[in-house]
Amino acid sequence: MPDLIPPMVYKSNALIEASYRLTVTEQRILLACIAQVRRDQPITDEVLYTVTAQEVAELSGTSTKQAYRELEEAALRLKRREVWIKEYPNGGGGRPETLVTGWVQSIRYVPAQGRVRLRFAKDMLPYLAELSEQFTRYALSDVAKMTSAHGIRLYELLRQWGDIGEREIELEQLREWLQLQGCYDSIKDFKKWVIEPAIEQVNEHSPLHVTWDQRKTGRKVTHLTFRYAQKEAARAIKQKKEAFTKQQAIDFEKPRQLSVAELSRLAYPGESTEAALRRLNAVVT
């Protein structure tokens, strides 16, 4: 029996780099519905997508009771959420235009069933379907258990760059994408409340392992550099380094193979070469 293909999320890169702010549960609702978008047929704004509290609980590893409560609260807010998307003329140079749109045109919550039904906004559809280039794809399960909305966004921004393994992002650009302009003005606070929790979530729940560093322009931190790899690859590199270090230690501990001339030079006056060899080996071990 063939393996089942996990639900996949497809987003245009323009949407990956859009400016918006959502809670974790709002993200889960949208991503679960985005994963239902059919890629083998045209999409319209009449298509209805459904997600239940039970499905959210199973995806996220939370209790059904908690999922029911959070789903209702998130559904009531989601209709009012905006996303700012920059569009470049002819897909290239020139000054971009900004599209401001909602995620959904309508959303309905059914309390008795713990069920959300929604239709995506018409302006949102080109960024979710019929994507032939400049899009990002990942499994819904990669982010489903994250409890940081910033962790989900960071994961998407890294996956956008595929297997390159490193992405440098201007700090103010990242603030704009996360809609955190004017928040956490201190780089210390930004790292503590945004970057470090996001990286912890990516490392714990996603297939990637991420490290990061900062770059200054003058005395001010202006860029963040993220280095990432599939956990299997990162684990293999770590094992190779550990094996190399261990071999170095073993080589260091091995008694040296000394020539007769060296033994004669190192021997005490009147000491035979055999006695000198025993003495030197005893010192090493």
Image (spheres, rainbow, N blue to C red):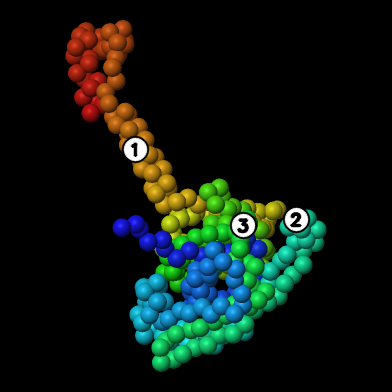
| Residue lying furthest front | 41
What x and y, as percent, mark residue 218?
70, 53
> In terms of sequence position, does the residue under pointer 3 or pointer 1 come before the other?
3
Dot 3: what SS? loop
Q: Let me know if residue 262 appears in the view.
A: yes
From the viewer's perspective, is the residue at label 1 or at label 2 nearer? Answer: 2
User: Number of labelled discs?
Assistant: 3
Q: Is residue 253 above or below residue 83?
A: above
Q: Nearer the viewer, residue 246 or 271?
A: 246
User: Image check: 72 left or right of 88?
Assistant: left
Displayed quadrant of residue 274: top left
Q: Amino acid at mark 1?
A: Ala
Q: Is residue 7 above or below residue 225?
A: below
Q: Name the residue tied to disc 3.
A: 132
Displayed quadrant of residue 226: bottom right
User: Image check: 24 left or right of 80?
Assistant: left
Q: Residue at x 68, y 55 (%)?
A: 219
User: Image check: 201 left or right of 223?
Assistant: left
Q: Let me know if residue 221 appears in the view.
A: no
Q: Amino acid at mark 2?
A: Gly
Q: Residues within 10 Å of mark 3 (few under 14, many from 20)?
A: few
Q: Residue at x 56, y 66 (%)?
A: 41
Q: Name the residue tied to disc 2.
A: 92
Quarter of the picture containing the N terminus is bottom left
Q: Residue at x 45, y 72 (%)?
A: 147
Task: Give the CA separation, mark 1 to mark 2.
Answer: 47 Å
Q: Residue at x 45, y 65 (%)?
A: 7
Q: Nearer the viewer, residue 28 or 210?
A: 28
Q: Name the residue tied to disc 1.
A: 243
Q: Residues within 10 Å of mark 1 (few under 14, many from 20)?
A: few
